[in-house]
Amino acid sequence: MLRLAFWSLLFLNAALFAYAQGLLGTARSNEHEPARLKRQFNTARMTLLTRDQAEAAAKAAAPPAGGDAADVTPSASAAASAPAPAGAPSAPAPAPAYACTEIGPFNSTDARRFEARLAALDLGDRQSRQTIQAQDVSSWLVHIPTQGNKEAADRKAAELRNLGVTNFYVLQGDSPLKYAISLGVFKTENGAQAMLAQLGKQGVHSARIAPRGPQTTHYVYRLRSLDAATRKRIEGFAERYDGADVKSCG
């Protein structure tokens, strides 16, 4: 009986010792658990995100359709999306080749025809017309300018006779040439120049040439901001009219 009690007590002590060892082992394991979790998760660098923030981050990290994320460099992406600087000047428009072009003169008939051709160019307010008074030259007068009165004209006539010039007459009438001395009227300027040279050889050095013909209204056109192609077309228009010149103006 004593022997059975002894073995029962010994067995109970062994069971209690084993139970105590188990509790101590669990405690030691739990004692090191926080350190292990800290090594796996760096809680100092963790940030909690909302659902919207997480979805936005996932979209930003996704590669574009049809290519890899590595295909788009940060510099290329920034350059493509960067807006133009505020106030940046735009590229200037090319300056016109001809700022101002003058064509003319035209008489009234030729002016109407010329304007009809200009209408096809649709120049708008870049086109203007000026009216000038001009002389339609029909002949050329070789003469000595007015002497101011009859007595002075008679003295000049006497000098001409002494030089051997007899083909002349004193102009009369109410005109700027009153008391001038005519030495001949010629159809061409060349004929008048030949007469002037002959009189010089005879010692007459005060003679002059003056165009003759009625005063008429002429027209001159000014065109602004023309390109080279339009200027060339206008030069072709002007070639159809005698005396019409094309030149640059201020």
Image (cartoon, rainbow, N blue to C red):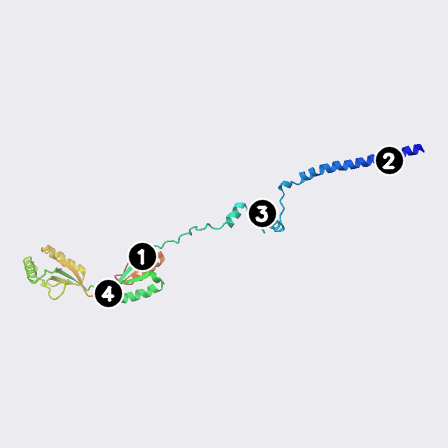
Q: Residue 217 carries which label?
A: 4
* Disc nearer the start of the sequence (1/2): 2
Q: Which of 52 and 144 is in front in this view?
A: 52
* Disc nearer the start of the sequence (4/1): 1
What's the residue type where badge 3 is placed?
A: Ala
> Where does the image place residue 32, in percent across and percent down from the top left?
71, 36
What's the residue type where badge 1 is placed?
A: Cys
* Disc nearer the start of the sequence (2/3): 2
> Where does the image place residue 171, in percent across and percent down from the top left?
11, 64
Q: Nearer the viewer, mark 2 or mark 3?
A: 2
- Disc 2: which residue: 12
Contact between marks 4 and 1 (CB within 8 A): the answer is no
The reply, left or right, for residue 249 in relation to residue 198 is right
> Where does the image place residue 23, in percent across and percent down from the top left?
78, 37
> Where does the image place residue 187, in percent across and percent down from the top left?
17, 63
- Disc 3: which residue: 69
What's the residue type where badge 2 is placed?
A: Leu
Contact between marks 3 and 1 (CB within 8 A): the answer is no
- Disc 1: which residue: 100
Graded by Cα atoms within 10 Å as few (under 14), some (14 to 19) or many (20 or more), the crowding at tag 4 reads some
